[in-house]
Amino acid sequence: MTLFERCIDIVLKSEGGYQCDPADKGNYTSSGELKGTNFGISARVFPDVDIKHLTKEKAKALYYKHYWMPMNLEGIRNANLILNMFDHGINAGKRGAIRMVQRIVEVKADGVCGPVTTMAINTYVPRIMVIEGYGMLQSVYDHYKYARYKYYADLIMRKPIKKKYQKGWYNRLHDCHF
């Protein structure tokens, strides 16, 4: 089983099957047609896909082509970090997911996972992270997981309407590991 196959199996458990929630902007094409999402593939991003009849295999192919390959994660040595970056890229945007780790490893946050970013990730020396007065030595993976939690908490603070997704987002983070 390839790393992509291992990652996509976990991602698809979080994404679920077909749903057509009129309150979710991702369920609409840019022309305003309500088509829904299926396996996390949204009408907003893929307006020409038959969302309702999308197969799991077709969804995997779309994820591979439009997320996995462009994110260029395979040179990273930590499989759990790769999974989290891939998952966050799907859920919150590819470039934002990469910029998040770039800020942690202190390289230019351009949203491109090239050789400089990959090397910085792979040579990252664990650092102390202080949370609620307690300091702990944390890997880049630990810092990334925390940054994801903070991302969702900040999003909910800025847009309280998103609170209805909080439990699902936090469950997604909790389950995002091998």
Image (tube, rainbow, N blue to C red):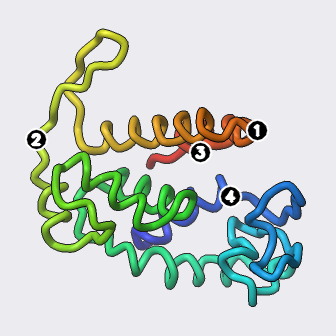
First in sequence: mark 2 vs mark 1: 2
Q: Residues within 10 Å of mark 3 (few under 14, many from 20)?
A: many
Q: Quadrant of the N terminus?
A: bottom left
- Disc sitting over residue 52 in the figure: none
First in sequence: mark 1 vs mark 4: 4
Q: What separation in Å lies between label 4 and label 2 (alpha carbons)?
A: 33 Å
Viewer-nearest residue: 162 or 35: 162
- Disc sitting over residue 164 in the figure: 1
Viewer-nearest residue: 12 or 86: 86
Question: Which callout, 1 or 4, points to the residue nearer the camera?
Answer: 1
Viewer-nearest residue: 37 or 156: 156
Q: Is residue 70 left or right of residue 27?
A: left
Q: What separation in Å lies between label 3 and label 2 (alpha carbons)?
A: 27 Å
Which residue position holds label 3?
A: 172
- Could you tell me which residue is drawn at 13 percent across and 57 percent down? 120
Instruction: Farthest residue to the top: give it.
Output: 133
- Disc sitting over residue 125 in the figure: 2
